[in-house]
């Protein structure tokens, strides 16, 4: 069965989607892993990065989730798009009102809906990566209930440290009440300007407070990232770029941790 990792933070614009894309691409191309990405964000940035216009899609993850509730799910392959060595369950803006519906009391067993959908995928993939929303609502709730692990992505600054603390509290609550097997994969620091004292102090504080959870690899800030995303290319394909080198380092560290769990 595939491992399900929710990639999350309660603050937007920190490189969460970029990390989901590049971790998936690296696992697929450099480690020959079968990878499925799930875009669980109504902004559909992951879908867009892979080159798809959400407005042009006939089916999305929202349709698949409704199929679970209404017991009329089509074959799971009908919802998937194969893109860049990976498969993706794409999203569009309709996911936002659907998230509101999840809180309305219309459906039963809301917490397990994504888990039930992923059970249809599990035997086909080694890793299923969920790009989560950046606020705590039902969409993040169902992601954490479905996940085996959470990868936290944050910037090394005051707000980033605060967001990590808040997210760790949420994970602990979900562990206690709904998903006892949920664990923290690690904390990846992104968009870092390590030339500033503020960033260095934030890294020191996080590593002191969260011993062993913070990845040694740190992703630096670069304007080239957004340029490559507009071209629908993974950062790994950048030549002699510090961001690409940092993601390579993170991928190696990620796999080293995976090997230690076996």
Image (cartoon, rainbow, N blue to C red):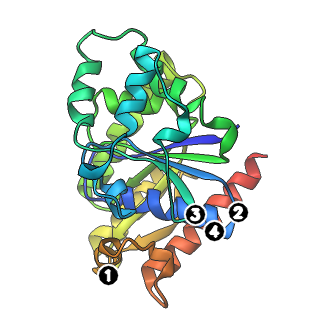
Identify which residue, 199 or 225, lies in the foreground.
225
**Residue drawn at x 65%, y 45% as measured from the top left:** 125
Q: Is residue 183 visible?
A: no
Q: Which residue position holds label 4?
A: 29
Q: Which residue position holds label 3?
A: 85
Q: CA distance from mark 2 to mark 4?
A: 5 Å
Q: Which residue position holds label 1?
A: 224
Q: Nearer the viewer, mark 1 or mark 3?
A: 3
How many residues crowd mark 1 within 10 Å: few (<14), some (14–19), many (20+)?
Answer: few
SS at mark 4 in the image: helix
Q: Nearer the viewer, mark 2 or mark 3?
A: 3
SS at mark 3 in the image: loop
Callout 2–callout 3 Cβ contact below 8 Å? no
Identify which residue, 40 or 178, lies in the foreground.
40
Q: Which residue position holds label 2?
A: 32
Using the rendered view, name the quadrant where residue 165 is placed: top left
């Amino acid at each position: 069965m595939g491992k399900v990792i929710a990639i999350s933070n309660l603050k937007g614009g920190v490189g969460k989607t970029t990390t989901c894309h590049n971790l998936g691409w690296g696992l697929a191309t450099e480690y020959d892993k079968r990878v499925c990405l799930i875009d669980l964000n109504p902004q559909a940035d992951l879908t867009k990065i892979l080159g798809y216009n959400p407005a042009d899609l006939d089916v999305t993850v929202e349709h698949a989730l409704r199929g679970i509730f209404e017991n009329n799910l089509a074959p799971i392959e009908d919802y998937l798009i194969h893109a860049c060595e990976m498969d993706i369950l794409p999203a569009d803006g309709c996911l936002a009102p659907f998230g509101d519906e999840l809180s309305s009391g219309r459906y039963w067993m809301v917490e397990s809906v994504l888990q039930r959908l992923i059970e249809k995928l599990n035997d086909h993939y080694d890793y299923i990566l969920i790009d989560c929303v950046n606020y705590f609502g039902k969409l993040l709730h169902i992601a954490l209930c479905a996940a085996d692990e959470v990868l936290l992505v944050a910037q090394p600054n005051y707000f980033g440290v605060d967001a990590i603390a808040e997210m760790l509290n949420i994970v602990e609550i979900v562990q206690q009440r709904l998903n006892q097997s949920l664990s923290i994969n690690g904390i990846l620091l992104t968009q870092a300007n390590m030339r500033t004292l503020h960033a260095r102090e934030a890294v020191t504080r996080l590593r002191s407070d969260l011993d062993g959870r913070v990845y040694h690899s740190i992703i630096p800030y670069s304007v080239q990232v957004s340029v490559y995303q507009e071209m629908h290319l993974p950062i790994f394909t950048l030549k002699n770029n510090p961001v690409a080198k940092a993601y390579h380092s993170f991928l190696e560290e990620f796999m080293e941790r995976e090997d230690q769990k076996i």
